[in-house]
Amino acid sequence: MIAGYNFAYLDEQTKRMIRRAILKATAIPGYQVPFASREMPLPYGWGTGGIQVTASIIGRGDTLKVIDQGADDTTNAVSIRRFFARTAGVRTTERTREASIIQTRHRIPETPLREGQIIVFQVPIPEPLRWLEPRERETRRMHAHADYGAMYVKLYEDIARYGRIATGYDYPVVVNGRYLMRPSPIPKFDNPKLDRLPALALFGAGREKRIYAVPPHTPVKSLDFEDHPFRVESWRERCALCGSGSSFLDEIVVDDSGRRMFVCSDTDYCSGRRAKRSGAEAA
Amino acid sequence: MTAAAAMRTGGFADPAAESQAAFRTLLDVLARPGRIAELKSAAVAGLSPAASSVALTLCDFETPVWLGGACAAAADWLRFHCGAPLAVDCGTARFAFAPGIADLPDLDLFDLGSDEFPDRSTTLVLEVASLGRGAALTLSGPGIAGTASLAVAGPSAAFWQARAALGALFPRGLDLFLTSGTQIAALPRATRVEVSPCTSR
């Protein structure tokens, strides 16, 4: 651990303030609690909210996994993992099953999360109504009155224009039948995983200074219409590496002639399946 | 030990690690209503070990604290360890500590937050005679798969009725930690509580 800093980088008073916000967020599922976000040693947009939440909950006994778009080995994930290894001295892992805390940018792991795990989302824009109503005072009033008609109108306009709801990520949800919430820019493919998730989900937005939460086993409904029910995306392709037909796939251009391949976005899930397969072939 | 010396004891010896561990316990019981956990810090005059852990973990100069009844004995300790201002009026307190329901005002006199800012509300830490024995409560709501049960001895039926009446005000409300010695459980505002007529042992 590096000297000269408090455990997990933040000072104790900051952690207390964030912890109070996390508790209120957990008590009011889906409601965005304002908090005094601190300046962090990395720019906004790199997970300053998620890092502050993780720093406030993490202890010496925790095992941390960090993913960026499903991958453990991208710059953002590697640097956040190293940040906590150096400032908190915690164990880190790339395995979803081994982690007690998973900080994520824009994915929920394919491996089902279990009771006792905490997943921390990095959130760029926490307010689901922001692109419909720029005034904070107004969106706050809309949440107070559960006045969410504008969002339905937006989804309806999608259908009128494109014949379907065209939102692919950050798809709006209603938490426990009350608060409209942005699930952070996860693909809508991951929305069903949030519904009655056994793990606790915490969301941190550093620039926008908001923390919100979904407690375990809480109903999370993706908005839809009776005649246009919510559907997740699917692929005709399978993962070119592990052969999975049920995971979220990334399309990758592999050469100058534009050939493409589809691979799992969740690197731990994909490598786990490949290891199992090569183990079966060896046996 | 003099009163002044007693006041200086009962803090966290390793604040970063102990407050983190205590916070995770608080988060765990709040996220899973019905669960009972242990918080083992020292008992101080006026507060049980579990209640003093809550104060050490969450209270500071930003959080006015209201102390009901015999909890008032912890005033000096709280000022010394947390630096928290004391609230004379419970309606201005972020945290309220009460040794039992006899020392509670009507629940709607606490700050329940506003519809716009429901988080700006009091968290009540209530000492009860027992957790795990007493009136059987059936809980449902966020954090609970189906229903959960919790037995609590101490609060009267009238108390549970008063708490249930606050449910209509959601998202405004009162978040409740129940403490008994070293044990703690939580009933956040969204948890629905049904009191069974029979009591368990």
Image (cartoon, coloured by chain):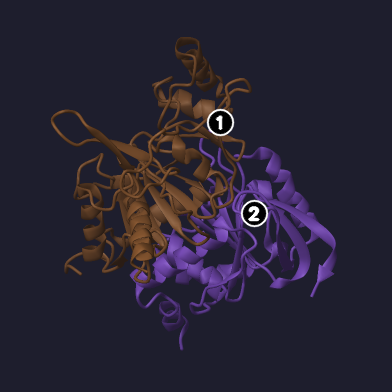
Chain colours: A brown, B purple
The picture places residue A68, in percent across and down from the top left corner, at: 29, 46
Distance between the Cα atoms at labels 2 and 1?
Answer: 27 Å
**SS class, disc 2:** loop
Mark 2 belongs to which subunit? Answer: B
Farthest right residue in view: B197
Q: Nearer the viewer, residue A210 or B28?
A: B28
Displayed quadrant of residue A106: top left
Name the image quarter holding the C terminus of chain B: bottom right
Q: Nearer the viewer, residue B89 or A149?
A: A149
Left or right of A190 on screen, residue A206 = left
- As shown in the figure, which amino acid type bears the numbered disc 2? Ala
Q: Residue at x 64, y 54 (%)?
A: B145
Displayed quadrant of residue A248: top left
- As shown in the figure, which amino acid type bears the numbered disc 1? Ala
**Mark identifier at residue B145:** 2
Q: Nearer the viewer, residue A171 or A31?
A: A171
The picture places residue A249, in percent across and down from the top left corner, at: 36, 39
Mark 1 belongs to which subunit? Answer: A
Displayed quadrant of residue A54: bottom left
Q: Nearer the viewer, residue A101 or B179?
A: A101
Left or right of B76 on screen, residue A39 = left
**Mark identifier at residue A240:** none
Q: Residue at x 37, y 59 (%)?
A: A277
Residue that label 1 marks = A144
Q: Is residue A24 above or below residue B32?
A: above
Q: Residue at x 31, y 48 (%)?
A: A241
Left or right of B149 on screen, residue A214 = left
Farthest top residue in view: A161
Q: Is residue A218 above or below residue B157?
A: above
The picture places residue B172, in percent across and down from the top left corner, at: 60, 41
User: Alpha-carbon neighbours of circle 1 within 10 Å: few (<14), some, or many (≥20)?
Assistant: many
**SS class, disc 1:** helix
